[in-house]
């Protein structure tokens, strides 16, 4: 039934998603504030048209949250669908093969049926819209088997600064039995998987100041500490020769997996050659004693995300800069705490600063790691749904990304999440040429109604 519905409505499903993708809802950049609201309005309209009640665009101190629900029977379980309609900035624009907000379908090696190229196609508009269309189908055919609440936010890509308040202030309204989130990846289109964890995040910005002004690099060079040289050395020193992070206490809380748990994690198929080929690298890099799956799944990291200072314009300017800056992210695993890690970073960074410079560490947003159960009724409902639509039982995996609000759902709403993602890691999320397989989009729409059906049965 759902298959026929998709076949009949395929073009419309694509057209509507394309309309959503044309709205540049970049949450990080104030210049796009009105577009963010437009995207919220778009989701509101489509939820309403599909049959949701109490649909509203709720203003916050930042970007709005779209809420809607369909309560059919208080004796049935309730699914809270969470996702985000905001997107990452599209820069650098010149690296896109087609404009980021003019979606087009192109075939790729991994997506022979075509992929939708646009910012937000996979992360997360395409995956949010699967839920809207699956809901439309369930409403039209009287198949909705659970109550459903939608909470689609516009600030995920900037750390969800206002969603926590909304959750805390609306605990009754958000009452549910599980949170269903499609904002993660699977292993491959023929290897379905479900993430059973997300990493946490500590994000800091650092500033190193040397002399009180930019100096002539000939007149002063060699005699005054150069903040860029110093910063580069400080960052480099934060990994040792085994690529362990050198911040004292950094690993103290890290949960060590048993050999059995590690073996389980490594059952997930991983093609190292394909991985290297996709990234055009001749070797992978990382912490000694762990393989690539473990490095992204169960180990914490420290990475410089941006570094600047001095002269970067055309030609040369002989200048010894007064300041240097960097943005640094640390991905965290259970049971690390983002506040503790940020404090440890700050203390360490200040302690390794040599004489002749001043340093400042400014914490940004953070988030806690989560592990989701793989034996709950909701997980089993998701597993069975994918087994039905893919013809293969999905493998539980640990994803490397973060969705900071998921830990808060647990803490404030007492709700566990199911990470029901249909993207691929190779879909270039946050990168130029982000895309989402047409297969993945339609497969998601096909699979979601099975989840609702299974969950209604299993949640007794
Ligand atoms: N959807 C991603 C997270 C993700 C991607 C998880 C792929 C697992 C697999 C989310 O939109 C994201 O990008 N999160 C940010 C969090 C940050 C902006 C606070 C991240 O992970 O960098
Ligand atoms: Mn996302
Ligand atoms: Mn993202």
Image (spheres, rainbow, N blue to C red):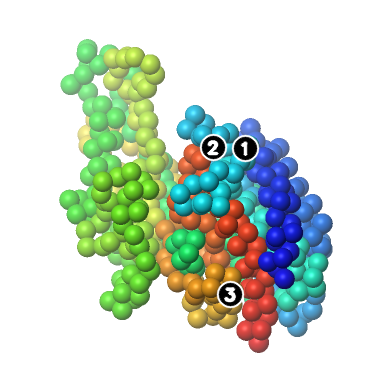
The mark closer to the camera, 3 or 1, is: 3
Where residue 171 appears, x then y in whole percent?
Answer: 68, 68
Mark 3 vs mark 1, CA separation in Å: 34 Å
Identify which residue is drawn at 37% across, 30% down.
308
Q: Is mark 1 within 8 Å of ligand 3?
A: no
Find out if the beta carbon at label 3 lies less than 8 Å from the nearest ligand 1 atom: no
Residue occupied by mark 1: 101
Give left or right: position of 140 versus 417: right
Image spot of residue 107 (x, y percent): 53, 46
Density class for disc 3 (Cα within 10 Å; few <14, some 14-19, many ≥20) is some
Q: How far across and down, in percent of the image, does residue 95 sit?
A: 47, 33
Residue at coordinates 39% horizontally, 41% vertically from top-left?
305
Give the mark toward the camera: 3 or 2. Answer: 3
First in sequence: mark 3 vs mark 2: 2
Q: Which tag is nearer the camera, tag 2 or tag 1?
A: 1
| Residues at marks 3 and 1 touching, judged by CB atoms closer than 8 Å | no
Q: Residue at x 48, y 64 (%)?
A: 190
- Residue 420 lies left or right of residue 138; in this view the side is left
Looking at the picture, tell me which residue is in the foreground, 86 or 200.
86
Q: Is residue 402 left or right of residue 359?
A: right
Marks 2 and 1 close (CB-CB < 8 Å)? yes
Q: Earlier in the sequence, mark 3 or mark 1?
A: 1
Q: Which residue is mark 3?
A: 388
Q: Residue furthest bottom?
A: 460
Q: Which residue is mark 2?
A: 90
């Amino acid at each position: 039934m759902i298959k026929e519905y998709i076949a009949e409505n395929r073009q419309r499903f694509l057209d509507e998603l394309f309309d959503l993708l044309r709205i540049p809802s970049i949450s990080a950049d104030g210049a796009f504030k009105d577009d963010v609201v437009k995207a919220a309005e778009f989701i509101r309209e489509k939820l309403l048209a599909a049959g949701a009640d109490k649909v509203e665009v709720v203003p916050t101190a930042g970007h709005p949250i779209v809420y809607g629900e369909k309560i059919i029977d208080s004796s049935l379980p309730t699914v809270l669908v969470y996702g985000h309609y905001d997107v990452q900035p599209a820069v650098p624009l010149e690296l896109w093969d087609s404009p980021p907000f003019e979606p087009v379908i192109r075939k790729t090696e991994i997506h022979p049926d075509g992929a939708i190229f646009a910012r937000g196609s996979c992360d997360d508009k395409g995956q949010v819209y699967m839920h809207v269309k699956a809901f439309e189908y369930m409403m039209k055919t009287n198949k909705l088997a659970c109550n459903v609440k939608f909470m689609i936010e516009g600030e995920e890509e900037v750390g969800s600064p206002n969603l926590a308040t909304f959750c805390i202030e609306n605990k009754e309204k958000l009452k549910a039995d599980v949170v269903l989130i499609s904002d993660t990846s699977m292993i491959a289109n023929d290897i379905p998987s479900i993430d059973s964890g997300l990493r946490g995040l500590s994000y800091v910005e650092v500033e190193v100041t040397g002399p009180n002004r930019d100096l002539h690099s000939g007149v002063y060079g060699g005699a005054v500490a150069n903040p860029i040289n110093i910063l580069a050395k400080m960052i480099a020193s934060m990994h040792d020769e085994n690529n362990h992070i050198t911040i004292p206490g950094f690993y103290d809380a890290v949960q060590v997996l048993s050999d059995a748990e590690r073996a389980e994690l490594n059952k997930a198929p991983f093609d190292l050659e394909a991985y290297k080929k996709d990234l055009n690298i001749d070797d992978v890099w990382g912490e000694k004693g762990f393989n690539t799956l473990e490095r992204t799944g169960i180990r914490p990291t420290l990475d410089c995300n941006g570094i600047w200072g001095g002269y970067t314009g055309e030609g040369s300017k002989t200048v010894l800069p007064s300041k240097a800056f960097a943005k640094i992210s640390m991905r965290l695993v259970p049971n690390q705490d983002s506040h503790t890690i940020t404090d440890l970073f700050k203390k360490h960074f200040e302690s390794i600063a040599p004489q002749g410079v001043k340093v400042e560490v400014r914490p940004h947003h953070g988030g806690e790691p989560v592990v989701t159960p793989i034996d709950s009724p909701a997980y089993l409902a998701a597993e069975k749904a994918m087994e039905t639509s893919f013809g293969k039982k999905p493998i539980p995996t640990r994803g490397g990304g973060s969705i900071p609000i998921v830990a808060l759902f647990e803490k404030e709403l007492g709700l566990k999440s199911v990470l029901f993602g249909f993207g691929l890691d190779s879909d270039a999320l946050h990168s130029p040429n982000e895309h989402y397989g047409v297969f993945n989009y339609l497969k998601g729409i096909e699979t979601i109604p099975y989840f609702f059906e299974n969950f209604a049965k299993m949640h007794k």
